[in-house]
Image (spheres, rainbow, N blue to C red):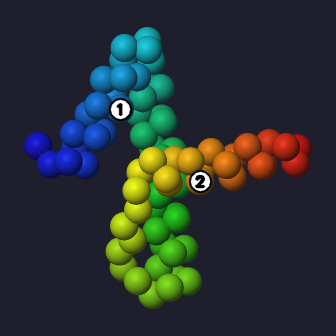
Amino acid sequence: MKENEKFVASYIAECRRGGATEEEIRRNLHVVYSFLARGLFGFYKATKQREIKVCLNEFADAVNEVAEGMLAIE
């Protein structure tokens, strides 16, 4: 199993341990896919680079900071 597959599998396992239904897990994965696909497309349009390498911890922190800021505006 590739690293990215292991990462997704560990997410699914963690959701199941938390009591999430298969539908909830599927919906969350779809939201994540949509977010990443749109982000990658926007990144490509802005930079013309096809790949981006990021640290997942730093990426998660950045997403959380933006989300917190958006919630503060509401």
Q: Report x, y in % for residue 33.
A: 44, 51
Q: Report x, y in % for residue 46.
A: 55, 83
User: How far apart, in angstroms, are the residues tagged by discs 2 and 1?
Assistant: 19 Å
Question: Pointer 2: residues within 10 angstroms few (<14), some, or many (20+)?
Answer: few
The residue identified by callout 1 is: 11
Task: Residue 74: give its label.
Answer: none
Quadrant of image for the N terminus: top left
Query: Which residue appears at 85% of the width and 43% of the height?
Result: 72
Query: Which residue appears at 43% of the width and 12% of the height?
Result: 19
Q: Nearer the viewer, residue 63 or 39?
A: 63
Q: Is residue 55 left or right of residue 34?
A: left
* Residue 70 against residue 50 in the figure, above or below: above
Q: Residue furthest right?
A: 74
Q: Report x, y in % for residue 47.
A: 50, 85
Q: Amino acid at mark 1?
A: Tyr
Quadrant of image for the C terminus: top right
> Which circle, 2 or 1, is nearer the viewer?
2
Query: Which residue appears at 28% of the width and 40% of the height?
Result: 7
Q: Nearer the viewer, residue 62 or 49?
A: 62
Q: Nearer the viewer, residue 21 or 60?
A: 60
